[in-house]
Amino acid sequence: MTGTAASLRIADSGFAALPTGVDLTSAASSAWVDLGLSLALPTAGTYHLDAVVRGNIGRMGTGENALITARLWDVTAGAVVPDSQAIVVQIAEFAPGAATALQWNGSTAISVEYKPTSPRTVRLEVARIDVSGTTEVAGIGSDTLQRTTLRYARVG
């Protein structure tokens, strides 16, 4: 039964939820921020890593273009988990002109297969990127409306 749900054996798993939101307004543009959400992968193997990240970003002015991006970071290896970067939310003004007040909320899912050769610690990181202008409000949300989460399942 290769490739079916019946053939997938979960050997180990872990889950963590961000207890409260994180304000990104004071972080420098393009600086990666450790959200304090990490999991220890206990052994070498094949893992399915999943994250759900909720973000909000707001600006007031003209020519807005900013975003929040997320990634999984292998702390042990000091490297990005391949193919784990995703845009959480972006705000951009299509036709620059009169000043406007804008705030956007969004979320993204990250889902990758990862095959470390030894035990690892993986954490969720985010960055606010101001392409043009200055962000006035930016953060990662986690509350009863939607949690920001990180999960792993070892499948081999």
Image: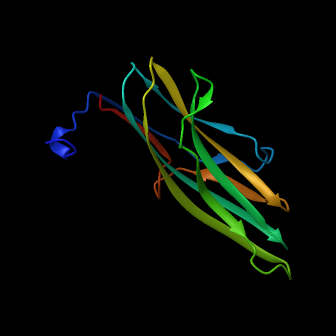
Relative to 42, is 152 above or below?
below
* Number of dots carrying numbers: 0
Residue nearer the viewer, 129 or 137:
129
Q: Residue at x 44, y 19 (%)?
A: 117
User: Would you say 50 lies left or right of 141 here?
Assistant: left
User: Would you say 132 lies left or right of 102 here?
Assistant: right
Q: Residue at x 77, y 44 (%)?
A: 27
Q: Quadrant of the N terminus?
A: top left
Residue nearer the viewer, 109 or 142:
109
Q: Quadrant of the C terminus?
A: top left
Relative to 144, is 28 above or below?
above
Where is residue 4 shown, x and y percent of the image?
A: 19, 46
Judged from this view, the residue extending furthest toward the front is 2
Q: Residue at x 52, y 30 (%)?
A: 122
Where is residue 84 shown, x and y percent of the image?
A: 53, 43
Relative to 149, is 81 above or below?
above
Q: Quadrant of residue 104?
A: bottom right
Relative to 60, is 46 above or below?
above
Residue nearer the viewer, 118 or 58:
118
Q: Residue at x 38, y 32 (%)?
A: 47
Where is residue 82 shown, x and y percent of the image?
A: 54, 38
